Image: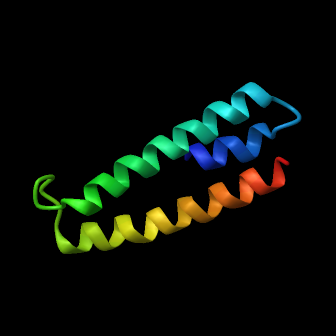
């Protein structure tokens, strides 16, 4: 299960500490993906892997925006 999925399951009101942990982990994962996209050759990534990571990065960003918007 993804960090975003865990955050959705935990919910802010049901488990605020777990929710915050999952959101933080998703942000860390997103940062790592973005570092890989910036310098793919240094990480040995192929073109298809970079494309996958770009799509996944967009999905995580959107999910984080939705999760944090709903938590306010």
In the image, 24: left or right of 29? right
Observer-nearest residue: 11 or 64? 64
Quadrant housing the N terminus: top right
Residue drawn where x is 54% and y is 59% of the image: 60
In the image, 61: left or right of 19? left
Residue 70, image x, y percentages: 82, 54
Location of residue 50 (image quadrant): bottom left
Residue 42, image x, y percentages: 11, 54
Residue drawn where x is 81% and y is 29% of the image: 15
Residue 7, image x, y percentages: 69, 42
Q: How many tags in the picture?
A: 0
- Name, please, the residue furthest toward the top: 17
Whether residue 1 is visible to the viewer of this picture, yes or no, is no
Q: Relative to 7, does residue 55 appear above or below in the rendering?
A: below
Indicate the colouring scheme. Answer: rainbow
Observer-nearest residue: 8 or 29? 29
Residue drawn where x is 44% and y is 45% of the image: 29
Residue 49, image x, y percentages: 26, 66
Location of residue 24 (image quadrant): top right
Observer-nearest residue: 13 or 72? 72
């Amino acid at each position: 299960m993804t960090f975003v999925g865990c955050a959705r399951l935990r919910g802010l009101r049901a488990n605020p500490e777990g929710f915050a942990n999952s959101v933080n982990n998703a942000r860390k994962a997103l940062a790592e993906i973005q570092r890989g996209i910036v310098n793919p050759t240094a990480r040995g990534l192929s073109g298809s892997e970079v494309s996958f990571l770009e799509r996944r990065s967009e999905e995580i960003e959107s999910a984080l925006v939705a999760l944090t918007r709903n938590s306010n």
